[in-house]
Amino acid sequence: MSLEPVRVAVIPAAGLGTRFLPVSKTIPKEMLPLVDVPIIDTVISEAVAAGCEEIVVVSAPGKEPLDEYFLANERLEERLKDDGRDGDLALARRGQSLARVTVVYQNEPLGNGHAVMCAREAVGDRPFLMLWGDDIVMAPVPVGTQLMQARERVGGGSVGGVARVVPGDAHKYGVVDGEPAGPRTWRVRRIVEKPDVPPSDLAAVHGYLLEPSIFDVLATQKPGRNGEIWLTDAVSALAARESVHAYEFEGERFDAGDRLGYVRAFIATALGRPEIADEVRAWLREFL
């Protein structure tokens, strides 16, 4: 059976970013730079590399710098044109040339599941890749592609990305309860959000490849922990109805929504840039 290809991605980016105060008071955390490229640019680039042609960014009121990244800055572009700075002009237009980007809004902070639900009209009745707007994985094969390949191997359905965590950190994540279904793959029975007693060491992180049926589940999902609508709760409910798998992706993950994770992602990005890598490496040796 031929599976419908995944050509649209949803990027929830509506959070307040309080872990990055005071800078996040005026600069959305998704716009913090990894050297000179915003975090959300890196996330969208992963989705594009996985074959997505349309991106739905879920923003929120007050995050205008994020929204404007995907629009033309005519004053800047005219100045660069006049100066003949074609390379800089291409960089200035990067946000609007990554893909076909639609920005939708979560007007109230009702949870990350509600944020995904805000993309329903834009996505329609299509399977979609969902990547968190502050989670970075450096891998030879983009995680989005790995999830699509896992979907092909298991014959369809939804697939979530998972990574192993030490027991003491499991309470920070949604944790998978499932049974082995192949190399690095599990059939999901349920996902427990921030459990006191984790059912495994497999944390749902980075993103999901979701069937559009998730929207029907989200539409009737009752608020869970802290009175919010959690995507993990909806995926857990979906797993009781249809095929949901978890795939332990390959690559080095950075939680760029956390101060330490962001610093690590920044340094790793700098070390991956050929024009500055040698100098950064030499400075780090000297500094340390």
Image (tube, rainbow, N blue to C red):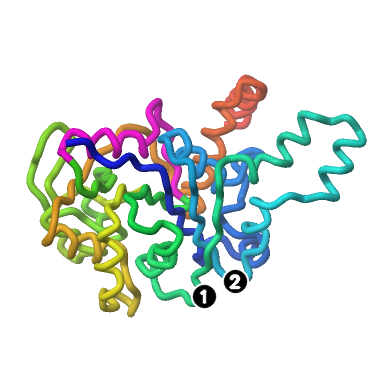
Residue type of the residue flagged with mark 2 = Pro
Image coordinates of residue 73 in percent, x first then y, are: 77, 50
Disc 2 crowd, CA 10 A, few/some/many (<14, 14-19, 20+): few
Q: Is residue 175 left or right of residue 107?
A: left
Residue ID for mark 2: 61
Image coordinates of residue 277 in percent, x first then y, are: 61, 23
Residue type of the residue flagged with mark 1 = Asn
Which segment is the magenta one?
Answer: 135-155
Camera-nearest residue between 244 and 275: 244
Q: Do we see residue 17 in this rendering?
A: no
* Identity of the residue drawn at 65% across and 45% down: 96
Camera-nearest residue between 8 and 139: 8
Image coordinates of residue 41 in percent, x first then y, are: 56, 44
Quadrant where the N terminus sits is: top left
Camera-nearest residue between 247 and 145: 145
Q: Is residue 34 left or right of residue 81?
A: left
Name the outermost residue toward the right.
Answer: 82
Residue 4 falls within the magenta-colored stretch: no
* Identity of the residue drawn at 15% across and 58% down: 239
Q: CA distance from mark 2 to mark 1?
A: 6 Å
Quadrant where the C terminus sits is: top right
* Identity of the residue drawn at 12% across and 47% down: 187
Q: Do we see residue 182 in this rendering?
A: yes
* Residues at circles 2 and 1 in contact by the CB criterion of under 8 Å: yes
Element type at marker 1?
loop
Element type at marker 2?
loop
Q: Is residue 186 left or right of residue 50?
A: left
Q: Return the disc, 2 or 1, that comes first in the chain's sequence.
A: 2
* Identity of the residue drawn at 43% across and 62% down: 119
Residue ID for mark 1: 107
Is 270 rendered above or below residue 133? above
